[in-house]
Structures are given as structure tokens and as C-alpha cells.
Image (cartoon, helix red, strand yellow):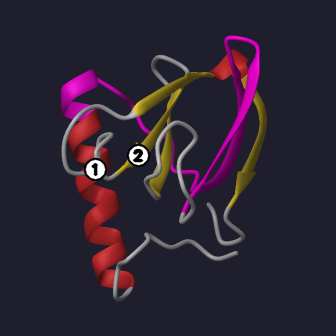
Amino acid sequence: MNFFIPHAENNEQENKVLNALIENIEQKKNADIDSERIYKLKFKHDGEKFEATVGENGPYEDEIVTAILYDKNYEVYFIFTYNRGTIRGEPILVGKNDVLRKILFDDST
């Protein structure tokens, strides 16, 4: 699967949304976002297993996952949905040690 941002109409729009998410989270959280483009994250939380996949419904609410980013400073993953970090609110946080599997987009750097 090649990189995409759900509902973006072209590569320019995808890059604009991705860059806005990165800039926003780096400013708010003093994050250092890795350049990997993450497609899917499987993780555990309170003993339960969850999955977040870009373009599919998120792990906790019925909203499409917009992007998944990794912060090298704090070793956490940010899962963005419409109301969790993309338009408003804070993204879902997943600690590095809670990740069971990470799958990158095929064209990830």
C-alpha cells in the first residue's frame, strides 16, 4: 500500500495535511517526528489488543484514522482521527513498549 491521507484529492493535499499534523504536534508536544510513514499499528492497552490502520475506523471510536506518527523524543506513537488531533482534540497516544506490530506504507522512507 502506498502512502495516502484519507479524503485527500491529490499528493499535494496529502503532503499539506501531513506537514500540518507534524508541525502542530511538534509545536504542542516538543516532539521530533520520525520520517517513517506508518500504515498500521497493532498495540495493547489495559490487557486488550487494538489495531489502528490509516483509512479505516480507529481503535476507540468510529472515526477514520488520518495518520500515525512516531515521536523519537518521547518514544510514543500518535494516532490521528478527525476529532483526535486532526481537526480538534489530542491524538491517541501509544507507548513504544505497547506496540505489538508496526507496518509501514510500501513507499515509506
In the rendered structure, the answer to whether residue 61 lies left or right of residue 100 reads left
Q: Residue 70's x, y, as percent?
A: 52, 36
Where is 36 relative to 8, above or below?
above
Task: Determine contact: label 1, label 2, CB under 8 Å.
Answer: yes
- Residue 42 point in image, percent of width and height: 73, 38
Q: Residue furthest front?
A: 62
Task: Classify 10 Å Cα crowding around label 2: few (below 14), some (14-19), many (20 and above).
Answer: many
Q: Residue at x 29, y 31 (%)?
A: 90
Is 46 magenta? The answer is: yes
Q: Secondary structure at mark 1?
A: loop
Residue type at mark 2: give it. Phe
20 lies above or below 75:
below
Q: Name the residue furthest bottom.
A: 10
Residue 49, percent from left and from top? 76, 29
Please check the rendered image and state whether residue 13 is part of the magenta-colored stretch, yes or no: no
What are the residue bounds of the magenta stretch?
Answer: 26-54
Residue nearest the observer in this picture, 71 or 40: 40
Residue 31 sits in which quadrant?
A: top left
Q: Height in image: 71 above or below 53?
A: above
Q: Residue at x 25, y 69 (%)?
A: 16
Q: Kindly state the secondary structure of the residue where label 2 is placed.
A: strand
Residue at numbered disc 1: 86
Q: Residue at x 75, y 52 (%)?
A: 103
What's the CA distance linking mark 1 and mark 2? Answer: 6 Å
Q: Is residue 77 left or right of residue 107?
A: left
Q: Please name the amino acid that badge 1 sits on.
A: Thr
Q: Quadrant of the N terminus?
A: bottom right
Name of the residue lying farthest toward the right:
100
Q: Quadrant of residue 12?
A: bottom left
Residue, x 71% and y 16% (percent of image)?
A: 97
Q: Which mark is residue 80?
A: 2
Q: Residue furthest top?
A: 46
